[in-house]
Every structure is written in structure tokens, then in C-alpha cells.
Amino acid sequence: MFGTKSFNDLAQEIAKGIEDIDHSKISVIICPPFTILDRISETIKDSSLVTGSQDCHFENKGPFTGDVSAQMIIDAGAKFAIIGHSERRKHHFETDEMVAKKVLAAIGNDLNPIICVGESLEDRKNGNAAKVIEAQLSKSIPANYDKDEIIIAYEPIWAIGSGNVASAKDIAEMCLIISNKIKDLFGDISLKVLYGGSVNAKNAKDILKIDGVDGALVGGASLIGQDFIQIVKDAL
Ligand code: PGA
């Protein structure tokens, strides 16, 4: 819940800041709030950026006052949707089953889901992180997922917005667990794993080098144009 109309300038700054980089190997997606999604999509339409939403309802339309469907998100010019972010799970009581329904609605409308999973600090301390993530993956992705690629954002809940990044060893271990589980569930599907949780312009380079990390989901640092541009360059 960051961003008003003035974020148009931020989107322009980011688009300009990354226009000369080699885009053959990376994708840069910005996911503004719904209220400015259409506007930002329009602003960046001739750049290498694409937009995504921060949620997506599981029905295409209907009496769901205040909710936003995949069709509406596509209509606003977005190509991706973050689904199952831990803040949605916490504040909106989204269960894995609801997340799976949202993923299904997204893919049914050719909206690419970025499916978030992550353990709590308690789970990590009790040694349950792997088990929790495997269960989230099994239940948050619909069994009939039929796209060529799955994008998972691994975001330890305690690392989001806290300034505490998971250790390189733990991130690598979790990426491997995620990739093995996805293989179990969906065979040889293409998988991208993003790490999220306090990624910033100072630590991105090291995080993006970790085995199994294909990209980053950046929250706070994306609100500062030059920092976000630096993170994109660190991904090259
Ligand atoms: P952060 O947020 O980068 O500020 O930790 C990540 C997120 O909101 O998923």
C-alpha cells in the first residue's frame, strides 16, 4: 500500500534508468497498487518494463465488492500478478486453497502468477521451514497447472521489511527444496525462484549470485528509483 499518481514519475525514472541494459536475459516487472496500475502500464508501454498486480481474485467477475479479477488486471495492461503474498495471507486470511484458486483464475486469463511462499520465524527456529514450504507449494499451486513455467517467490516472512535477510546458505537450501518439490509435482516444468525479503541496492548482488536464485522480489527498495535501477543492473 505504497504509491499514488506521483509514482508515474518513479516508473518513468526506472524505465529510463534501465533502457540501455541488455534485456535478453532479464525481465523487470513492476507491481504497483491497483489504483495506478492502468496509468503505470500506459506510461511504461514503450519501455522494456512490464507491470503486474499485487493480488488477483479467484472469480472473473461477480458480486465481490472491492475485489479485482484477473480480467480486470489484464484490462489494466498488466501481465503478471503476485499471488499469496504473506501480507495477504496474514491480513486477509488467504489460505493455500484460496491462493490455488487465484492462480487458476490468473492462468485462465493468461496472467502470469508469481506465487509467494515463506516460513515464519517460529517455523524456521523449530526446524520446520522446509516442511512448511513444501506444504505451501503442494497446496498453493493447482494440480491442473498447465503453463510452461512456474514463478515462485520465496519470501521468509520474518525477512520482509525487517532489514534481516536470510543467510545465503538457507536461501540456497530453500531454493533446492523448492525446485525438488516442483519437480515432484510438475515434472520438468521451467521454474524461476525469486528471493524476497529486505533485498536492497547493497545486498542484491550477493543474493542474486546464490545457487538457485533466479531473481528478486523487491519491496521497500523499489520505491527509490536509483536503488531499484541498481538492483536490476546487479541482476545482469
Ligand atoms: P521488502 O518487501 O523488500 O521491503 O522486504 C518484500 C515484499 O514486500 O515482499
Image (cartoon, rainbow, N blue to C red):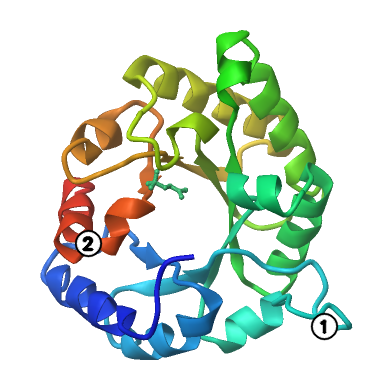
The amino acid beneath tag 1 is Lys
For the view shown, which residue lies furthest in the left direction? 20
Give the residue number, with chain letter if any, for mark 1.
Answer: 61
Q: Position of residue 107 (x, y in %)?
A: 69, 65
Mark 2: amino acid: Ile
Residue 47 as seen in the image, left or right of residue 37: left
Label 1 C-beta lies within 8 Å of the nearest ligand 1 atom: no
Classify residue 27 by image quadrant.
bottom left
Mark 2 lies on residue? 224
Per the model, the C-alpha gap separating discs 1 and 2 is: 35 Å
Numbered circles on residues, count = 2
Which secondary structure, mark 2?
loop
Position of 147 with respect to 44 (left or right) is: right
User: Residue drawn at (66%, 58%), measured in percent from left and top?
Assistant: 147
Q: Nearer the viewer, mark 1 or mark 2?
A: 2
Residue 173 locus on image (x, y percent): 47, 18
Q: In percent of the image, x 67 and y 36: which residue is there?
A: 187
Q: Is residue 85 visible?
A: no
Residue 170, relative to residue 96: is it above or below?
A: above
Tell me: 203 left or right of 1.
left
